[in-house]
Amino acid sequence: MQVIIIGAGRGARLMPTTAETPKCFAEIGGKRILDWSLDAFRQNGIDDFCFIGGYKIEKVQADYPEFEFRHNADWPNNNILLSLFHAEDLMDQPFICCYSDILFTPDVVARVAANAEDISLAVDTDWLSRYEHRTEHPSDDAEKVTVKNGAVTRIHREIQESDAHGEYIGVAKFSAAGAGRLRDYYHQVREKNAGQPYREAAVFEKAYLIHMLQDMLETGERMVHVDTPGGYIEIDTQQDFEYARQHWS
């Protein structure tokens, strides 16, 4: 199983921690965020990693020579969706993609990897417990989902807390067929929207992955949710960093 880790951005909200190193090098419990992710995959027998880097990519290249790398050199001017597609050449097979600034358990990987659907999204159903004191990254910034009969019906930040089944954690699995449809749809929307506004993004190049996933849902694409009650922390701000240091082990 191919793993694609999306880690090109600087993580400005985590300054000064990211002043000299990429965000995924921040240490929680004596280990880098990146190493927690690698351990979660390796405990499930998954050890084929591609890292999409930009900011301070040379630091990751020096410390993780076993990775394949894709360089998003224009990272200040694009976002997660375009960053992911720097590894499009690896999407001719099943793959799991994940954000580089998240902590998740091996059980999350096991559940996602075992799911037989073409597109499956890991969703934290205990998500609100982390937002009780998360004032720097409130719940209206969460990538929330609604669901019905096992399928995701919407993925959007504007979903109300009371309507949300949970928060998409940034871990998704695509079968070979699902990856093919993802690639096809990406090229359709890029051809139509390059340099133009796209959904909530000012321009297509600044789109998040969830923007295109929602677009695909609206065309009838099926995506399922793989639930985890916790076992996940996003580290976006210094407040998140301190929370993770206190609560993750």
Image (cartoon, rainbow, N blue to C red):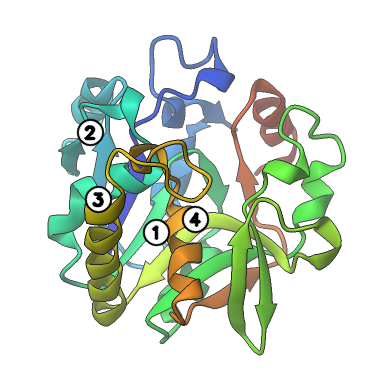
Q: Amino acid at mark 2?
A: Asn
Report the Cα–Cα distance between label 1 and label 3: 21 Å
Q: Position of residue 90 (x, y in %)?
A: 16, 60
Secondary structure found at label 2: loop
Report the Cα–Cα distance between label 2 and label 1: 23 Å
Label 1 Cα neighbours within 10 Å, binned few <14 / some 14-19 / many ≥20? many
Q: Amino acid at mark 3?
A: Phe
Q: Position of residue 125 (x, y in %)?
A: 73, 65
Residue 212: numbered disc: none
Q: Which residue is mark 3?
A: 85
Q: Amino acid at mark 4?
A: Ile
Q: Position of residue 166 (x, y in %)?
A: 71, 63
In the rendered view, does 74 fall on the left or right side of 165?
A: left
Q: Position of residue 164 (x, y in %)?
A: 76, 64
Residue 72: numbered disc: 2
Asked whether the beta carbons under mark 1 and mark 4 sit within 8 Å of each other, the answer is no
Report the Cα–Cα distance between label 2 and label 4: 19 Å
| Residue 107 visible from this viewpoint | no
Residue at 65 percent across and 51 percent down: it is 157
- Tell me the quadrant of the picture where the C terminus can be found: top right
Q: Which residue is mark 1?
A: 41
Q: Which residue is mark 4?
A: 210
